[in-house]
Amino acid sequence: MDVSLIVVVVVITALVFDFTNGFHDTANAMATSIATGALRPKAAVAIAGCLNLVGAFLSVQVAKTISGGLVDERLITPVVIFAGLVGAIMWNLTTWYVGLPSSSSHALFGGLIGATWVAGGAGAIHFNTVLNKVVLPAVLSPVVAALIAVTVTYLSLRITRRAEPGVVSRGFKLSQAVSGSMVALAHGTNDAQKTMGVITLTLITAGTLPAGSGPPFWVVVAAGLAIGLGTYVGGWRIIRTLGRRVSDIRPVQGFSADTTSAAVILSSTHLGLPLSTTQVCTGSIFGAGAGRRVAAVHWGVAGRIALAWSFTLPSAAIVGAAASWLAATGTVGVIVVAVTGIAMAAGIYGASRRNPVTADNVNDDPTAPTTDLDLAA
Amino acid sequence: MHIDWASLATVAVVAAAAALTIVLLISFAVVAVSRPERRAGGPDGGEASVTHTGVGTAIAALCVLAAGFIVCYGLYLIIA
């Protein structure tokens, strides 16, 4: 296939992935602020969108490898990247449809692992690194975040129990707007970088950029706009799950959850131990829910989310592998993958319109089915 | 297999300390500006209440300022 054509295809696909990453992860920063009424839904996603865009410009320290050493980097070609992105996008759309938060990074890693497996066999996958960088953090980070959030929420509720409820509510709602914004900013800095890295590496492998180059300005702008726009569109289905179906979140809990998430994400990034924003935020929200009353948390939702997390890597890998196998056949294969992907995305979007979740009904009664999976059934 | 338990423990401790400090500071600020729930038939307060409000506001301002410093440090970490 013509190199310039596959590069264009990969760049567009990477920006689509960035967009899905944005709307998939809006809930991380703003679900609790929307649920508690600290911010109006439209205002919350607008703030998160702007901060994600700003975050994309704050740092251009692009990761040297987009796969984090999970696979043999020598086998990564534009076709493999394209196939990996398709796998990640499909997983992001599927989990969005059923309203379950899952890691976009892990979906991308899964897609790349599957695509590389097809390109170079099982030996091209570094399973030890997969275990250390994906599986263990996926298990430990939400637990750590939840434990911190439980403690913080419990203490905060104890301290403020005799204060005027109105003042408590106003004070924490105001603080929550700040803490949620911090999470949104951190998200923009981390996740927009990922797409910049994908596009930059593609340009390097295609010979458009010299090895070791940083992202060109247009890549920074495009990645920032894609993730910002995606965040603004708002993944309302996941926002509803995290904001309304985990527990009856109050401003104290929302502030505790957001502050815990921001603290864990920032400290882990600073100490060079990258964790999934989604998993940290989800753990914090469950912890904040349990901090008031353990029984008030819908643990069934936690089970479904954990199930989705366990399927993220293999599911994205299977789609990535299939896409890689088809795309490797040449131009026709790439076109077939692209058309199939667009058709599936359109199908998922069409199905979601039968039961739309928008800014108007995102805070509806949580006694309804616990995830959109139930509604779809 | 190498698991960087030291980094993980450091992240947990630092994050816990930061989150705990900020949330507790804001909680104390909220309590400071909030009047305690009045008991039925209790005294009205008068001048003492005015003093209490002034001191409470000052404590709240200090707590918010301290929390603000930590948030600014977080912003610095994002940018740096």
Image (cartoon, coloured by chain):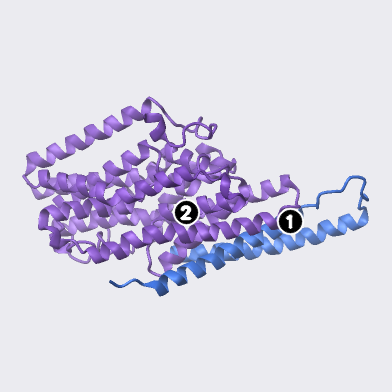
Chain colours: A purple, B blue
Residue at 59% in and 65% down: B69
* Quarter the C terminus of chain A occupies: top left
The reply to whether residue A207 is visible in this rendering is no
Which tag is nearer the camera, tag 2 or tag 1? 2
Kindly identify which residue carries mark 2. Answer: A283
Tell me the quarter of the picture where residue A90 sits: top left
Tell me the quarter of the picture where residue A356 sits: top left
Marks 2 and 1 on same chain: no
Q: Residue furthest bottom?
A: B6
**On screen, A232 above or below A361?**
below
Q: Is residue A338 left or right of residue A47?
A: left
> Chain letter of disc 1?
B
Q: Residue furthest top?
A: A354
The reply to whether residue A305 is visible in this rendering is yes
Kindly identify which residue carries mark 1. Answer: B31
Of B79 and A329, the residue lying toward us: A329
Question: Residue B21 appears at what percent x and percent y?
Answer: 61, 65
Q: Amino acid at mark 2?
A: Gly
Q: Amino acid at mark 1?
A: Val
Q: Is residue A57 left or right of residue A338?
A: right
Residue at 56% in and 51% down: A290
Of A40 and A8, the residue lying toward us: A40
**On screen, A120 above or below A11?**
below
Question: Residue A116 appears at what percent x and percent y?
Answer: 16, 55
Of A238 and B3, the residue lying toward us: B3
> Chain letter of disc 2?
A
Residue at 44% in and 31% down: A357
Rounded to the nearest angstrom, the CA distance separating label 2 from label 1 is 27 Å
Assign a secondary structure to mark 1.
helix
